[in-house]
Amino acid sequence: MAEKWRIAARRLLSRRILLSHGGGGKETQEIIEYLIRGLVPKEYWRVGDGTGLDLLDDASYIPVDGRNRIAVTVDSYTVDPIIFPGGDIGVLAASGTINDLLVGGARPVAALDAIIVEEGLETETLAYVLNSLINTLVENKVALIGGDFKVVPKGNIDKIAITMTGIGFVMKELRDDAIKPGDKLIVSGPVGSHGAAILSARGTYGLKLDIKSDVKPLTPLMLPLLEKYGDDLRAAGDPTRGGVAMLLNEWARKNGLVIYIDEAEIPVEEEVRAYADVIGVDPLALASEGVAVLAVSPEKAEEILSFIHELGYRDARIIGEARKPKSEKHRGIVIAKTPVGGFRIVEVPSGEIVPRIC
């Protein structure tokens, strides 16, 4: 195993970094595995019996005492354009940080930001972005307890980049590796809207449609679910970079299961589906920034879905389930039933899906 790791690491080191390495797909996994995790001694992957590089989840757990844990998450946000239909980099950074804590089963309580701005950026634009960021935190009862601000010479960064750390109190551990055969999968709303909105706003492929990002915090969804159905929630994730395709492949791999989904049941806005068809992109690989994917106990799946509808998420659907693989070659894959009745393997996204998206 060590020799296999060394060979793979040498192969990676012989290349240059490409935009695809930051896309959240296969290439990003290689960077994490061979340039980060593989170099950290395993005893430093986590704190005590918490989680960290061993699980590589949206948030990591740090034990505080015998019973309580805090969840911590960190993410960098760089999007082009920085103000896009349905949002901007400020609300994106705040929502992404809040959502990573929520899908880890934690109640967000605090955040810190680190902002790097390009020399020459209009102060009015910076104020607009910061107002969005702060208002989103305040509306979700999250304190901004510190941060950093830097300016770099023009041309050294494209307008603005924001890094945020989020801290929350764990209500129920939702771990990517806790999914069992038979668990049902629920998506809270239409997927792929953020990725399509960014591509459309850029005029990529010479085509612009009226598509808005779905960026928003998942607080109104996740906190009631954790309070009422915490024992029936196995795992949760927000399908950002790499979309639903990336998230479900990670779940299948981490649990050694087959994830089976019915594409006809996955909600996608008509404009997003049409745009994806025209440019030849799988909508399942496009990012969402205001959607949760949940793995829940099969006994309570319909009841949980009804509760989600009552919370106002009327487009939520049960889209599939986790299954025990029939053979070793099926372990860790995602199989989709197509709308015409066939089947396909949903691959791990690779290449420049949508660079600089979040």
Image (cartoon, rainbow, N blue to C red):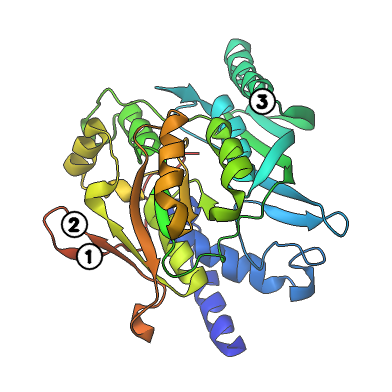
* Disc 1 secondary structure class: strand
Give the quarter of the image for residue 247. Answer: bottom left
Tell me: residue 138, above or below residue 116.
Answer: above
Query: Going from the N terminus, do you reach mark 3 or mark 1 first?
Result: 3
Q: Which of 302 and 11 is in front in this view?
A: 302
> How far from the left and from the top, in percent, is residue 326?
33, 82
Query: Which mark, residue 284?
Result: none
Q: Do the residues labelled 3 and 1 touch (CB within 8 Å)?
A: no
Tell me: residue 66, above or below residue 304.
Answer: below
Query: Which mark, residue 137?
Result: 3
> How far from the left and from the top, in percent, is residue 84?
43, 24
Tell me: residue 45, above or below residue 297.
Answer: below
Q: Which of 180 and 198 is in front in this view?
A: 180
Q: Which residue lies furthest to the left in this view?
A: 340
* Disc 3 secondary structure class: helix
> How far from the left and from the top, in percent, is residue 186?
40, 49
Mark 2, mark 3: which one is toward the viewer?
Answer: 2
* Disc 2 secondary structure class: loop
Q: In this view, does 136 lie to the left or right of 338?
A: right
Identify which residue is drawn at 65% across, 65% down: 36
The amino acid marked with disc number 3 is Leu
The amino acid marked with disc number 2 is Thr
Query: Which mark, residue 338?
Result: 2
Give the quarter of the image for residue 67. Answer: bottom right
